[in-house]
Amino acid sequence: MTSFQTVLIPAKDLAAARELYTKLLGTAPSADSDYYVGYDVDGQQRPAEGRQSDTGAGSAARNESPTQHIGLVPGGGEVTSYLHVEDLNGAIDQITAAGGSVVEEPKSVGGPRRVAVVADPSGGRIGLLSDAG
């Protein structure tokens, strides 16, 4: 497992949240649509394989400087921090073997990126994100 790099924040009013986070973070969104607004807050992009900005360089070079990504999603609910992992299924197996549980089954969210949400034994939510497919 690597590090927590992505935080998704539900917003009942995405336009108002976009305005607030643009001012708060001091940068324009790197992704901006009616269903998702994303910010790369340290100014370094870490493209996933197969994304438009992918240059074909080896994945090790792309992973040297991880970006903190803040994403706004429509709706209410809990903020979820995503741990970036190489092996999504393996991470789920480790967590469930240690007493955790699966909250949201793995799903594809574009390109090779897959996500899942698990809970630790006390119910704390952890997002898992993998670009390994």
Image: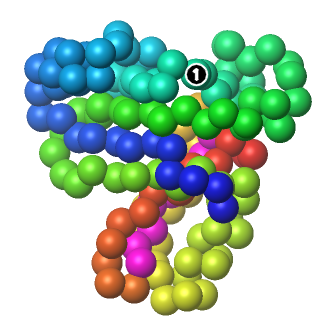
Quarter of the picture containing the C terminus is top right
Figure disc tally: 1
Residue beneath label 1, please?
44
Vertical position of residue 9 compared to residue 50: above or below:
below
The quadrant in which residue 25 appears is: top left
**Can I make out residue 28 in this image?**
yes
What residue span does the magenta drawing correspond to?
A: 113-120
User: Quick check: is 119 in the magenta stretch?
Assistant: yes
Colouring scheme, one of rainbow, by chain, secondary structure, one colour: rainbow
Q: Residue at x 55, y 82 (%)?
A: 96
* Percent position of residue 70, x then y: 38, 34
Q: Residue drawn at (31%, 78%), measured in percent from left and top?
A: 123
Side of 106 where 14 appears, left or right? left
**Crowding near the residue tagged with mark 1, few <14, some 14–19, many ≥20 C-alpha atoms within 10 Å:** few
Residue 52 lies in quadrant: top right
Question: Which type of secondary structure does the marked residue at label 1 adopt?
Answer: loop
The answer to whether residue 105 is magenta is no
Residue 54 sits in quarter: top right
